[in-house]
Image (spheres, coloured by chain):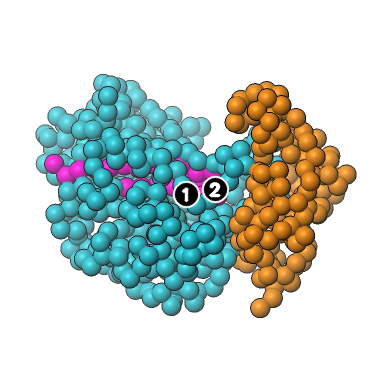
Chain colours: A orange, B cyan
């Protein structure tokens, strides 16, 4: 069985104050992740205060952009296109909600190595997603 | 301090409708309240505490629905924890009663998602200022795929199979055949479930709960009042509540907040999983049941698949009868919030008022368990333990 990948229409997210930095970097092809200057732990989604030690000294770092699929679900009956939602564990150690793209949906597996790619949302905003490495 | 023995569930009512084409949400809430008061043998004037959640319409649930129903409560609580809210409300009502803040607490739930065309494959509503939404909404999270990812991980890590998950639906359908109000009354087989269309891998259509209109209500009272009424005594003996999210990116979908709310409730109640004669387990999807059973300690982590297989959840033959009304998988799921009906079926079982074909013999201790919200990203777990006196 094969379910070929097709680009789908992605609605641009409404950002909160402080989120622009993440998406501006994405539009330049860079994936950012937040790191705490005090406890040194990475976290995602990005926050102004570290969710591990509550320090207010969190910093944007450029992620390597590589990771491993923690889990996924090929979503077959939610809209016109089949798409795969997933959690990818970045090499920095944090997991992020994302989509797996540019590959046969039926060949996706937990544990698979993936690398970041950027897909345009409506209006041109770049959205980080992952394709097989 | 503990809530053990501080309050009793004196009234319970499940609205009979499954499609409320011509009834407003406010009217449904009020009809449920009226039904629960009649069941308890109390009147509107007796109510001095009111509890409701995000499904209650208006400027705010307590303000609008108190006004609509003509209540004058001296204690209100609109804790919203999705479908688990009503389990939390029983616990909070017991706390309020113990502190002298009210004597007769009314809890209502109602909604018409079926008439309004809701489904688990549509994007969830994202409000302004959600801190997480900008990093999630582009990826198409809908209810079913956020539960499916937990199922996929469980299968990968523990070898759980689709056939094992299917047994949960099969057991629910065995119970629903005796409930004339249930939306799905046909007994189904494991083959029926795994042969139904795949919605979001690995969950099939029959792994999902129904979408229904309806509602329910409960009356929680102080012990002296419970003893003055002519109803069997259903005592609240323990409760726990626990939100669980993505933990800053340390995502682990193999367990739910029930791993925290369960031990809290068992400890307060002074009972263990082996004391539970009947369990209502929130069944938004089959995987939801399996994870909660493990987290509550009915079996070891990873062994839920084996535990639910071969009819082990079917009343009369299985070791742990569950959701004897047919649950969300077959009976109803009013307002897309299943916590209320979980408590109501516990009350029926403890009173001996369940359908004779599914009534558990000597049902003296029962547990209701709920997961509200979205399993993978963020949810709340609530556990409630009750005893027949
Ligand atoms: Zn920190």
Q: Is residue B346 magenta?
A: no
Q: Quadrant of residue B135?
A: top right
The yes-or-no answer for disc 1 within 8 Å of ligand 1 is no
Q: Position of residue A99 (x, y in %)?
A: 70, 56
Q: Is residue B155 left or right of residue B299?
A: right
Question: At x 74% / y 57%, what residue is drawn?
Answer: A114
Mark 1 to mark 2 CA distance (whole Å): 7 Å
Question: At x 64% / y 64%, what residue is drawn?
Answer: A109
Mark yes or no: residue B28 visible. no
Where does the C terminus of chain A fall, quadrant-wise?
A: bottom right
Q: Judging from the image, what secondary structure is the residue with disc 1 in?
A: loop
Q: Is residue B141 left or right of residue B53?
A: right
Name the residue beneath numbered marker 2.
B252
Q: Position of residue A51 (x, y in %)?
A: 61, 31
Q: Is residue B358 above or below residue B79?
A: below
Confirm or deny contact between disc 1 and disc 2 (CB under 8 A). yes
Name the residue beneath numbered marker 1.
B255
In the image, which residues are magenta? Answer: B368-389
Which subunit holds the residue at mark 1?
A: B
Q: Position of residue B12 (x, y in %)?
A: 26, 45
Q: Position of residue B360 (x, y in %)?
A: 19, 58
A37 and B81: which one is in front? A37
Q: Main secondary structure of the magenta part?
A: strand
Q: Judging from the image, what secondary structure is the residue with disc 2 in?
A: loop
B12 and A125: which one is in front? A125
């Amino acid at each position: 069985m094969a379910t070929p990948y097709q680009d789908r229409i992605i609605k641009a997210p409404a950002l909160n104050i402080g989120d622009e930095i993440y998406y501006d970097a994405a539009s330049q092809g860079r994936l950012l992740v937040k790191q705490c200057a005090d406890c040194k732990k990475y976290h995602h989604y990005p926050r102004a205060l570290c969710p591990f030690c509550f320090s207010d000294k969190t910093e944007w770092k450029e992620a390597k952009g590589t990771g491993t699929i923690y889990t996924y679900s090929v979503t077959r009956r939610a809209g016109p296109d089949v798409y795969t939602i997933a959690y990818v564990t970045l090499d920095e150690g944090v997991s992020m909600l994302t989509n797996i793209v540019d590959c046969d949906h039926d060949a996706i597996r937990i544990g698979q190595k993936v690398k970041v790619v950027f897909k345009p949302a409506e209006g041109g905003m770049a959205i980080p997603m992952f394709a097989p490495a | 301090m503990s809530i053990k023995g501080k309050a009793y569930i004196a009234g319970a009512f499940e609205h009979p409708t499954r499609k409320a084409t011509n009834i407003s949400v406010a009217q449904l809430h009020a009809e449920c309240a009226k039904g629960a008061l009649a069941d308890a043998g109390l009147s509107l004037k007796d109510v001095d505490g009111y509890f409701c959640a995000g499904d209650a319409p208006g400027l705010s649930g307590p303000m609008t629905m108190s006004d609509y129903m003509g209540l004058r409560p001296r204690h209100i609580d609109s804790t919203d924890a999705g479908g688990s809210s009503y389990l939390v409300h029983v616990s909070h009502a017991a706390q309020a009663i113990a502190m002298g803040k009210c004597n007769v607490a009314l809890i209502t739930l109602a909604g018409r998602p079926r008439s309004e065309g809701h489904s688990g494959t549509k994007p969830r509503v994202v409000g302004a200022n959600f801190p997480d939404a900008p990093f999630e909404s582009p990826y198409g999270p809908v209810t079913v795929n956020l539960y499916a990812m937990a199922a996929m991980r469980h299968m990968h890590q523990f070898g759980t199979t689709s056939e094992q998950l299917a047994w949960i639906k099969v057991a629910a359908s065995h119970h629903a055949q005796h409930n004339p109000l249930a939306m799905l009354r046909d007994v189904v087989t494991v083959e029926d479930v795994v042969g139904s269309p795949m919605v979001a891998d690995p969950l099939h259509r029959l792994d999902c709960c129904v979408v229904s209109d309806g509602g329910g209500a409960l009356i929680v009272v102080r012990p002296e009042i419970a003893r003055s009424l002519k109803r069997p005594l259903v005592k609240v003996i323990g409760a726990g509540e626990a939100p669980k999210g993505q933990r800053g990116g340390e995502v682990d979908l193999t367990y739910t907040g029930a791993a925290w709310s369960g031990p809290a409730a068992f400890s307060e109640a002074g009972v263990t999983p082996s004391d539970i004669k009947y369990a209502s387990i929130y069944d938004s999807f089959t995987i939801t049941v399996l994870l909660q059973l493990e987290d509550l300690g009915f079996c070891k982590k990873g062994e839920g698949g084996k535990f639910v297989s071969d009819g082990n959840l079917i009343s009369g033959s299985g070791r742990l009868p569950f959701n004897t009304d047919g649950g969300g998988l077959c009976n109803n799921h009013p307002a897309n919030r299943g916590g209320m009906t979980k408590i109501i079926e516990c009350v029926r079982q403890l009173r001996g008022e369940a359908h004779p074909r599914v009534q558990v013999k000597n049902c003296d201790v029962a547990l209701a368990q709920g997961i509200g919200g979205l399993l993978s990203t963020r949810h709340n777990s609530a556990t409630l333990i009750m005893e027949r006196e």
